[in-house]
Amino acid sequence: MNTPVNRTILLLDIERYSDRDDIEQSFLRRMLYDIADQTLDAAGIDSARRLRADRGDSVMELIDANAPVSVLLRTLLTEVPVQLRKTNRMASSSAQIRLRAVLATGYVAIDAHDGWVGSDLNHACRLLDAQLLRDALRERPDDFALCVSDSVHQGIVRHGHPGIRPEDFHHIAPESKNGRLSAWLHGTAPVSGTEKEDEARTSLHDVAGESVGATAGEPAASHTPGATHITGDQYGVAGGNNHGGLSFSFDQRTAKDQS
């Protein structure tokens, strides 16, 4: 396995892809590639500075870490909704394309079988698959739901770069098979079934505590919900293959800031 290198990670996934027939899936894949290419081109990231893996209903992009993440994020927020509106205006109701997206940074290695390996990539893939992000997309009128990793929020979002409003991002902690994740969702976060159950249990606990306290003539005990912590690395979950003959050609150039 090659040495892990720092990369920007972009994941894009089509909603309800498996519900479509073969003709519709073929159309949706073409539209996904077009939207990804046009967005990355608009951000000044040409094919020599990125590597793509095709996952059927989604694409994974590893991008040169020297390409400005602020430019890419701003472009995702503006260009993808425009492309989706343009595409869906011309598509039938059964071929409407709606996308979930994750933007993250981290270390990724490529193994001897062209598989992509790294816990940062695994984390991004689990965010993409999180039910909370799926729920958010169902509530979005612009057919697009985007979340960013803690590292992107810390390094980019919270500083309020032009075109990026920190107040538009909200912290989320969706469940995954490996425990709770941490990320930042653009737009209002939905209340998932799990969160509703947690709130109900907390409310029930508080009511019970107040009742006991009143009976004993003592103040009710305070309740602090517990937190789940994830430790250790998991590797090999989100491998991918390089399609289309793309290759790394990373140099020290900085992409031209295009907004």
Image (spheres, helix red, strand yellow):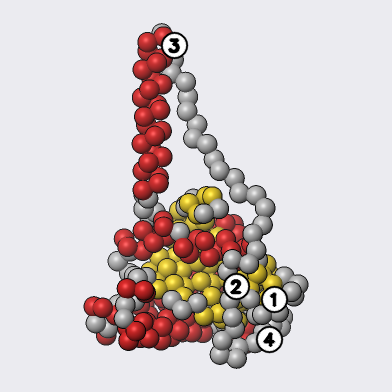
Q: Secondary structure at mark 2?
A: loop
* Amino acid residing under circle 3: Glu
* Amino acid residing under circle 2: Gly
Q: Quadrant of residue 2?
A: bottom right
Q: Secondary structure at mark 1?
A: loop
Neighbours of disc 2 within 10 Å: few (<14), some (14-19), many (20+): many
Q: Is residue 143 above or below residue 218?
A: below
CB contact under 8 Å: marks 3 and 1? no
Q: CA distance from mark 1 to mark 2?
A: 9 Å
Q: Nearer the viewer, mark 1 or mark 4?
A: 1
Q: Which mark is residue 111?
A: 1
- Judging by the rendered image, the residue that carries numbered circle 4 is 249
Q: CA distance from mark 4 to mark 2?
A: 21 Å
Q: Secondary structure at mark 4?
A: loop
Q: CA distance from mark 3 to mark 1?
A: 62 Å
Q: Nearer the viewer, mark 3 or mark 1?
A: 1
Q: Quadrant of the N terminus?
A: bottom right
**Residue located 49% across and 35% down the image:** 225
**Residue located 32% across and 86% down the image:** 23
**Mark earlier in primary sequence (3, 4):** 3
Q: Is residue 27 above or below residue 196?
A: below
CB contact under 8 Å: marks 1 and 2? yes
* Amino acid residing under circle 1: Asp
- Is residue 118 or residue 163 the one in the foreground? 118
Outermost residue toward the bottom? 245
- Judging by the rendered image, the residue that carries numbered circle 2 is 239
Q: Quadrant of residue 110?
A: bottom right
